[in-house]
Amino acid sequence: MNDRLYPQFKILLVDDEISFLRSMSLTLERQGYTNLLTCDNPLNVKQLIATNHIGLILLDLTMPVLSGQDLLNWVKEEYPDIAVIIFSGLNQVDAAVDCVKKGAFDYIVKTANQEQIFESIKRAIRTQELSLENQSLRAQLMSTQLSKPECFSNIVTANKQMMSIFYYLESVAQSNQPLLITGESGVGKELIAEATHALSGRQGDLVSVNVAGLDDNIFADTLFGHARGAFTGADKQRLGLVEQAAGGTLFLDEIGDLSSSSQVKLLRLLQEGEYYPIGSDRPKRTQARVIVATHQDLTKRQDEGVFRKDLYYRLHTHRVDIPPLRERPEDISLLIQHFMKQACDEIGKSPLSIPKTLALHLTHYAFPGNARELRALVYDSVSQSRAESLNTKPFETLIEKNSLGLFDENQIQFSDNTPLPTLNQASEILVNEAMARANQNQSLAARMLGISQPALSKRLKNMKENQKDEQ
Ligand SMILES: Nc1ncnc2c1ncn2[C@@H]1O[C@H](COP(=O)(O)OP(=O)(O)OP(=O)(O)O)[C@@H](O)[C@H]1O
């Protein structure tokens, strides 16, 4: 059972008509708005605002003793950040214009259809949520410490960009809006989803599903479940993952590969907050926060016409892009340590010492598989280690394979009018680059250059002497 209140601030309903208050609260609760407060005496409103975190007031216009207009004036003066929607029994254009001029978010006639009322409330809540998120982001920018560092304990990093992502996540973790996580395969998107769920403080579960390759029917069945008898073989009702994630988080991985018909279903879930189990004509409201991730470039997928624009914009409100490991060289040695300890723990080995130069050697490697690739390498090395030090053979093989790969001649382009380097200059540039990539290891640099180590040593010596002569 989910007892999480929504939205994160209270909605205050003010009306002297108790029956209206009762029916409106019931209707709103059925729509998933559970954080409600009712008040049938306008004179109590000031006290209620002073003692509660109220973000939205649904205010009756015509009340005895203190009118809705007077209260609106007072709220806008004392608490300009609270949104006020005026409810009136009468459809009066003048009054509506006057209220909106005085700062009301909207003016609604009590007899308006429910869709119109819900739409207005939804918009007001969204505006308030955005404003709270802005305040929180501003506060995070000013602060130099994470409020809940323990939520990031599984993510090893010393990278500044990753730290800014952590600050950003602290600001948006409470939001009900979706979060989009992008980044190459293996950068740690799932870890980021887990940290966001932990930060959100949601009591429900984090329910993860990889949606790549799910056909539309399986997608709908997996997410929304089905009613008994919905199709042949559906002899029991089945709850979908959206329901299992109630009060928690639904994490949809590989969202860039979602089929176009499933994209429509997801959009409806995000936009309307409701869904239909297969074979049921009664919509259900979702209580789950949605996080999606992809290694695909969604802008490109959109341009190619395979990803819906409207869904892309819906997902775009909160977004983090995790940098690849090659752009976080400072993380390499930390991750090697971390994975080495994990691997040793798993096989009951004492921690191994790691050669200091190992991380340095890896800084020129592109890590197409990111942290996952590094993890696999470290695990392989740990399993091959017989002494107290980490066996670096798997790393050396990789670096050599990478450095000694076939050179693509098209990589070098000369423009027509610029002077060419002399043969000596070109050779110096190459030697310096190879030495840097090999971290000053002459044997490796020589292999990259296709010459013997003594030949390289001779060139280096000559280069040094030439430099001296020039000085
Ligand atoms: N910064 C990190 N600290 C510790 N472990 C990490 C870090 N980044 C990634 N890992 C580990 O690397 C592996 C891959 O991470 P994860 O599954 O989160 O990547 P991903 O981006 O979701 O990959 P994919 O796109 O393939 O789904 C996991 O074992 C994860 O624990």
Image (spheres, grey):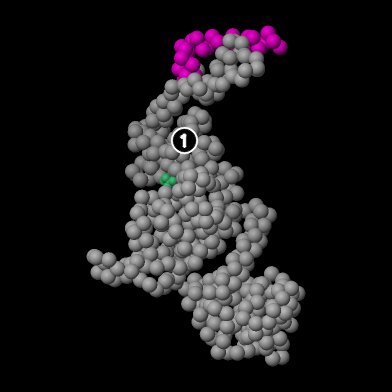
- In the image, which residues are magenta? 444-471
Dot 1 falls on a residue whose secondary structure is loop
Residue 129, given in percent of the width and then of the height, sits at: 60, 65
Q: Quadrant of the N terminus?
A: bottom left
Question: Which amino acid lies under the numbered mark 1 shown in the image of this protein?
Answer: Phe
Label 1 crowd (10 A; few <14 / some 14-19 / many >=20): some
Residue at the spot x=29%, y=71% of the render? 228
Q: Main secondary structure of the magenta part?
A: helix
Residue closest to the eye, 334 or 364: 364
Name the residue beneath numbered marker 1: 367
Residue 460 within the magenta-colored segment of the rendering: yes
Residue at the spot x=38%, y=42% of the render? 344
Instruction: Count the numbered circles shown.
Output: 1
Q: Is residue 117 visible?
A: yes
Task: Indicate yes or no: mark 1 CB to ligand 1 under 8 Å.
Answer: no
Q: Is residue 357 visible?
A: no
Residue 428, given in percent of the width and then of the height, sits at: 58, 15
Residue furthest bottom in the image: 64
Residue at the spot x=63%, y=74% of the render? 56
Q: Where is 57 relative to 368, above or below?
A: below
Residue at the spot x=46%, y=24% of the render? 403
Residue 318 within the magenta-colored segment of the rendering: no
Residue 165, given in percent of the width and then of the height, sits at: 57, 50
